[in-house]
Each structure stands twice: as C-alpha cells, then as structure tokens.
Amino acid sequence: MNWIYLILILIATVFGGMIPMLVRNLRPNLPIYMLAFTGAFLFGITIMHLLPEVYHELGHEAGIYIVLGFFLQVALQQLSHGMEHGHTHLPSGDHHHVAIFPLLVGLSLHAFMEGIPLGFNYTDQSALPSLMMGVMAHKVPEALTLITVMMHAHQPRAKLWRILIIFACVTPVSAILAAQLGSHFQVVTKSLIYMVALVVGAFLHISTTIFYESGTKHHELSKRKVVAITFGLLLAFLTLIFE
C-alpha cells in the first residue's frame, strides 16, 4: 500500500470540492473540459492497464464481471443522477428539494468502488501508479460537481465541508480495506480480482458516458472537447513508460 498515492487522491478530491466554494464566477465550460480530459485519461488507463490484468488473471471469465460492473454503475447512477460523470441537472429541476441522501449514497458507493483496485497487487508494475493518476484526476471534477450540486441545494458552508471531507476519505479508506483484508484473508485475496473486473466495467461506463453526454448539446462533440479527450488519451499512453 502506497500511502503517498492515497494522500494525493484525498488532496485532489478536497481541491476539486473547494473550487466552487472559492471561485464565484466559475466558467461553466471548465468542468466539461476537465471531465472530458479526465474521462479520456481514465478510459486509457482502464484499457491499457486494468483490462489486460483482469483478463490475465481470470481469462474469458473476466468479461462476465466487466459487463456486470458496467450495469452496476448504471444502477448506481439512479441514485447519484450521474454526478460521477458530470451531470448536475436533476429530474425535478429544483435543486432545493433534491433528496441529498440518495445522491451521497450513490456517489459514495462509486467512490468506494474506485478505491478497491488501489488495494490490489498487480503483476504489471505500471498499473498501480497509472491507476492512481487516473483516479486522482477524475476526483477533481467529481468533487467539483458534488459540491456544486450541494451549493445549489442551499446547504450551509459547514455542512459542505463535512460532506467534502467525508467524501474525500471514502476512496482512500476503500483502498486501505482492500489491501489490509486482502493481505490477511485468503478469500478476500481471491475475490479482489473479481471486484477489480467489476470496477473496470464501471470505469468503462463512466468514461464513455463522459465522451458523449456530459456537457454536450444533442450528444455532440465540440472541437475543444475533442482536444481535451485527445490530451487525456495521450497522457494515458505516456503512463506506459512506467513499465
């Protein structure tokens, strides 16, 4: 377990949540391009590092769990309303009457899933640092979106900070639990690779949804969003130097 990785993820989450609290006139397109960049980066990391790992460990059986993870994320976003991939428009259209608890539960479950692969021992030595960078990058717009929605729901500042700190701790705590339980219990050790495969499916859903939905009109890809996606993929390719 690399504690530096977990601290960096925690800092990135807090930083992302602080942006809407400190920047009054945040450009509306900024989160869109941030999500496009980080979504593409996470997509590249998933394809180039996590996907080969789970197929190496599980063979064709990996595909079953990846598909299950994909649709597990579909179910989770019924609670989170897609905040993990940048959606801030909620069904009622009135943020003041948003049911805060289901949103937090859905997003926290997603954050918990993100931490599980960080506690796994990979045969590919470049997988863990690459995954850490992908999760860390994704946490910034994710936390930004969460706090933006909470602010629109007129939550007091003290509560905003509590929500942000608790949310920032979820992924590191998940990684610690996966690593510690995996090192002490054989059944957990054997189960971790299946959970990683589930998370791969969830990551594929989130990243591809970001490409075609978040912040777009009629699911169009603007030139600037294409540039952001391109840079995210290029950065993912650069992680191969860790090998």
Image (cartoon, grey):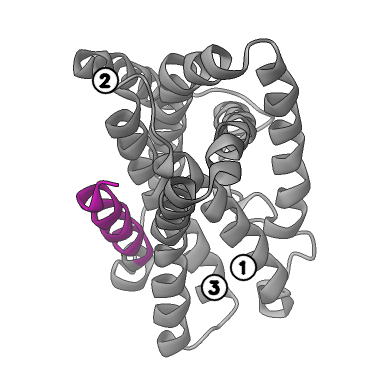
Position of residue 21 relative to residue 118, above or below, is: below
Q: Residue at x 52, y 49 (%)?
A: 185
**In this orientation, which residue lies closer to the viewer: 159 or 7?**
7
Which span is picked out in magenta? 1-17
Does dot 2 land on a helix, a strand or a loop? helix
Amino acid identity at mark 2: Thr
Please state the horizontal and vertical placement of residue 200, each as a whole percent of the image.
57, 29
What residue is shown at x 47% (from left), y 39% (from top)?
Answer: 117
The image quarter containing residue 48 is top left
The residue carrying mark 1 is: 104
Question: From mark 3 to mark 1, how far is it between C-alphas?
Answer: 10 Å
Question: Which residue is more in the foreground, 24 or 41?
Answer: 41
Give the residue pinned by disc 2: 239
Q: Main secondary structure of the magenta part?
A: helix
Q: Which residue carries the number 3 mark? A: 150
The correct choice, above or below, for 215 with respect to 58 in the image is below
Element type at mark 1: helix
Residue 85 in sight here: no
At 54% from the left and 73% from the top, the residue drawn is 150
Under tag 3, what secondary structure? helix
Image quadrant in which the C terminus is located: top left
Q: Of marks 1 and 2, which one's residue comes earlier in the chain?
A: 1
Query: Quick one: label 1, few (<14), some, or many (20+) residues within 10 Å?
Result: some
Q: Earlier in the sequence, mark 3 or mark 1?
A: 1
Q: Is residue 35 above or below residue 148?
A: above
Q: Per the image, is 9 magenta?
A: yes
Discs 3/1, front: 1
Mark 3 and mark 1 residues within 8 Å of each other at the beta carbon: no
**Residue drawn at (69%, 35%), measured in percent from left and top?**
69
The answer to if 16 sits in the magenta stretch is yes
